[in-house]
Every structure is written in structure tokens, then in C-alpha cells.
Image (cartoon, rainbow, N blue to C red):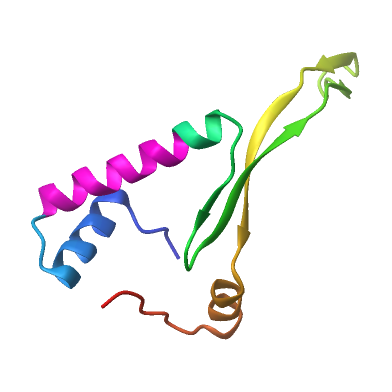
Amino acid sequence: MNPITHKELIKQVSYNIGMKQADVERVLNRYVDLIAVTLASGQGVTVRDLGTLQVLETPAKKGRNLNTGELIDIPPSRRVKLRPCAGLKQAVLKGIIIVTGK
């Protein structure tokens, strides 16, 4: 199963709430921008009915070049982790469709 695209998400939200696609796209893009800025600052973000996004720091470590076998240094980095809310976990496990909003 293929993931839903940004364009398809906008079309579905637009249809479901009766808002113009251009307006939905502006709102969705701003929403994602705000989440990205907040995560980049090191803060977590809780999105109702989805879960909590948080930034995890990974320390520097040693690795191995699989082609040459040479030891290499892997620099520290940051990654985003989603801790899903209980409702989302249950919906995914049971294949339930959750409808939120009015």
C-alpha cells in the first residue's frame, strides 16, 4: 500500500471540510513549518489524536565501511521520533477508522 501524498491529503481535507484546496494547502504547510521550527529548537510537539514528536540526540560512534572494512567515525546527529497516542495505536492495530473534528 502506497502512502498518501501531500496533494491527495489536501484534496481529502478540502472535500471533508468544504474548504478551498489552496486554503487547506496554506494551513497544512504552515502547520508543518511550525512543527519543524519547534522541533529544530529542541522542543517536542504534541499533536492531539496523533501523538508526540520529539527530537532525539544520537551520540557519535564508531562504524565500519562495509566495502573496505575500515573503521569510520559516525558524527552525532538528531532524529525525530513519533510516540503515537493510545487511540492511534489502537486504530492501527485493529484497523479502525478514526474520525475527529466536527
Specify whether residue 33 is painted magenta: yes
Quarter of the image containing the N terminus?
bottom left
Q: Nearer the viewer, residue 10 or 5?
A: 10
Residue in front for this viewpoint, 19 or 72: 19
In the displayed structure, 84 sits above or below 26; it is below
Q: Position of residue 29 (x, y in %)?
A: 29, 41
Q: Quadrant of residue 71?
A: top right
Residue 65 spot, x, y in % from top left: 83, 20
Residue sitting at x 59%, y 68%: 85
Front residue of 3 and 17: 17
Residues shaded magenta:
21-36
Vertical order, 16 against 23 (above or below): below
Residue 42, picture quadrant: top right
Q: Is residue 73 magenta?
A: no
Q: In the figure, is residue 55 to the left or right of 3?
A: right
* Residue 31 percent coordinates (x, y): 34, 45
At 42% from the left and 60% from the top, the residue drawn is 2
Residue at horizontal 54 percent and vertical 36 percent from the top: 39
Q: Main secondary structure of the magenta part?
A: helix
Count of marks placed on residues: 0
Relative image position of residue 53 (x, y in whole percent): 58, 49
Where does the C terminus fall, quadrant-wise?
A: bottom left
Closest to the observer, 102 or 24: 102
